[in-house]
Image (cartoon, rainbow, N blue to C red):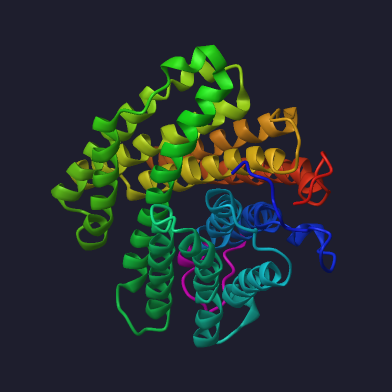
C-alpha cells in the first residue's frame, strides 16, 4: 500500500478529492458509520422504541456494524491496496462515486425508520459487495495476481452471508440470519488473519529498526493458524455449540497467540501507531478462547462475539485507517494525542462490552452504556483528527 496513486492526474476532468482514492471516502464514512450507527443503537436501548415492521433490533445492529462500518473499512483498504499490489490505476472518479452511492443506499434502505419494503432493501443492500468485487477483479486478473485474487472469493462469501440474512428477514430461509452472521464474522476474521499476517510483522520490523530484527513469522505456525481459522467457519455455521467447534476455537486461539508472540509487539510500546496493531490482534486469541469456552463450558456467547467485533475488528480498523490515512496523504506516520486517546477509549469499550455478560446483573446496563459511550467518543475523535486529512490534498503535492 505504498506505491503512488495514478488517480487525479491532470489528463482529464478534475476529480473531487474525496473520490480520488478509495480510502478517502470509505475510511471517512466507516468512521461516520461507527459513530452514527452506535449512537442510534444506544438510542434504541435507552428508549426501547423500534418499528413493528422491521427485523429484530439486535439483528439490525449486528448487520449494520458488520455490513455498514466493517465492510466500508474493508472496501477502503482493498481499493487502496490492490493498485499497489498490481501497479494499476486506482478506482476513482465516477466508478468510485457509484460504489459510494451503493454503500450509502444500502444504509438508508436497511435503516428501519425509512419503511422501505424488505425485498427492495435487500436488493439495494446486497448490491454493494458484488460492485466492489467487480471493481477489484479487473486489475487483479489483468495483473495475474492470483494469490491476492483470493480476496475476490472472500468478497463473494461476504455477499452470500448478507444474502442469507436478508432471506431470513424475508421469511424465505429459516435460520438464515444465524448462518449469515456466522459466515460473515468468519470471513472477516479470515481477512484479519491474512492481512494481519502481512502487515503486522512488516510494520513492526520497519518501525523498530534494529530492534525489529527479531520480529518473525514462523512457517510452522502460519499454516495451522490459517487452516484452523478457516475450519472454524463451517464448524460455527453448522454446530456452534458443539465440543468440536469449541476445540477448534481453542486450538485456533493458541495458534494466533503464538503467531502474535513472534511479532514481538511488546517492543513497540513507545510507538502508539504500532502498539495499537498488536492490541487489536491480541483480541483475536482472546475472542477465540471465549468462543471455545462458550461451546465447552457455557460462557455467554456475547463475550466472544464482542471480543472479536469490538476488540479485534474495530481496533484493527481504527489502527489501519489512522495509519493509512497519514501514509497515503503524504504525512508523517506520527499520530496525535487525540488519536492515542481514541485508541485507549476503544480498548476500554472493547473490554467493557466483552466483560458485560459476565458481570453481576446490576452492573450489566452500566457496562453496556459506558462501553457504547467510549466507542462513540473513540470514533468521534478519529473523525475530528482524520476528516481534515481525508478531505485535503496530499501534503507532498502528489496526486491521490
Quadrant location of residue 268?
Answer: top right
Q: Where is residue 197 in the image (x, y as percent from the top left)?
A: 41, 37
Quadrant location of residue 224?
Answer: top left
Residue 362 visible here: no
Write the residue at 54% across / 34% down: 347
Write the residue at 80% across / 57% down: 17
Q: Where is residue 14 in the image (x, y as percent from the top left)?
A: 85, 65
Q: In this view, does 48 lie to the left or right of 22?
A: left
The relative height of residue 12 versus residue 289 in the rendered view (above or below) is below
Write the residue at 38% across / 71% down: 160
Which residues fall within the magenta stretch?
A: 47-63
For the residue pair 196 and 202, the one nearer the viewer reads as 202
Write the residue at 74% across / 32% down: 338
Is residue 395 a member of the stretch shown in magenta? no
The relative height of residue 265 versus residue 7 in the rendered view (above or below) is above
Q: Position of residue 110 (x, y in %)?
A: 57, 74
Amino acid at each position: 500500500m505504498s506505491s503512488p496513486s495514478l488517480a487525479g492526474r491532470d489528463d482529464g476532468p478534475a476529480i473531487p478529492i474525496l473520490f480520488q482514492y478509495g480510502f478517502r471516502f470509505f475510511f471517512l464514512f466507516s468512521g461516520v458509520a461507527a459513530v452514527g450507527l452506535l449512537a442510534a443503537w444506544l438510542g434504541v436501548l435507552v428508549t426501547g422504541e423500534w418499528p413493528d415492521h422491521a427485523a429484530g433490533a439486535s439483528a439490525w445492529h449486528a448487520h449494520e456494524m458488520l455490513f455498514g462500518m466493517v465492510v466500508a473499512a474493508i472496501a477502503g483498504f482493498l481499493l487502496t491496496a490492490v493498485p499497489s499490489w498490481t501497479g494499476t490505476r486506482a478506482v476513482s472518479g465516477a466508478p468510485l462515486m457509484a460504489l459510494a452511492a451503493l454503500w450509502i443506499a444500502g444504509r438508508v434502505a436497511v435503516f428501519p425508520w425509512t419503511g422501505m419494503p424488505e425485498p427492495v432493501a435487500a436488493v439495494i443492500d446486497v448490491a454493494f459487495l458484488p460492485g466492489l468485487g467487480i471493481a477489484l477483479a479487473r486489475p487483479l486478473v489483468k495483473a495475474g495476481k492470483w494469490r491476492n485474487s483470493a480476496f475476490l472469493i472472500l468478497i463473494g462469501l461476504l455477499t452470500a452471508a448478507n444474502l442469507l440474512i436478508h432471506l431470513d428477514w424475508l421469511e424465505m430461509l429459516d435460520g438464515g440470519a444465524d448462518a449469515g452472521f456466522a459466515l460473515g464474522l468468519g470471513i472477516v476474521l479470515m481477512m484479519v488473519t491474512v492481512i494481519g499476517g502481512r502487515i503486522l510483522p512488516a510494520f513492526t520490523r520497519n518501525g523498530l529498526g534494529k530492534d525489529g530484527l527479531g520480529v518473525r513469522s514462523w512457517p510452522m505456525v502460519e499454516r495451522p493458524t490459517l487452516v484452523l481459522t478457516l475450519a472454524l467457519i463451517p464448524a460455527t455455521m453448522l454446530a456452534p455449540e458443539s465440543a468440536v467447534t469449541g476445540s477448534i476455537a481453542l486450538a485456533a486461539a493458541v495458534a494466533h497467540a503464538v503467531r502474535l508472540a513472534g511479532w514481538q509487539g511488546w517492543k513497540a510500546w513507545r510507538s502508539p501507531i504500532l502498539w495499537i496493531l498488536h492490541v487489536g490482534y491480541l483480541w483475536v486469541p482472546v475472542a477465540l478462547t471465549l468462543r471455545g469456552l462458550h461451546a465447552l463450558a457455557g460462557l455467554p456467547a456475547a463475550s466472544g462475539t464482542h471480543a472479536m467485533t469490538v476488540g479485534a475488528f474495530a481496533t484493527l480498523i481504527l489502527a489501519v485507517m489512522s495509519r493509512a490515512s497519514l501514509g497515503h496523504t503524504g504525512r508523517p506516520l506520527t499520530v496525535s494525542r487525540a488519536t492515542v486517546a481514541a485508541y485507549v477509549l476503544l480498548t476500554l469499550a472493547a473490554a467493557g462490552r466483552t466483560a458485560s455478560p459476565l458481570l453481576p446483573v446490576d452492573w450489566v446496563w452500566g457496562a453496556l452504556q459506558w462501553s457504547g459511550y467510549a466507542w462513540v467518543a473513540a470514533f468521534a475523535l478519529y473523525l475530528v483528527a482524520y476528516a481534515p486529512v481525508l478531505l485535503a490534498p496530499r501534503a507532498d503535492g502528489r496526486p491521490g
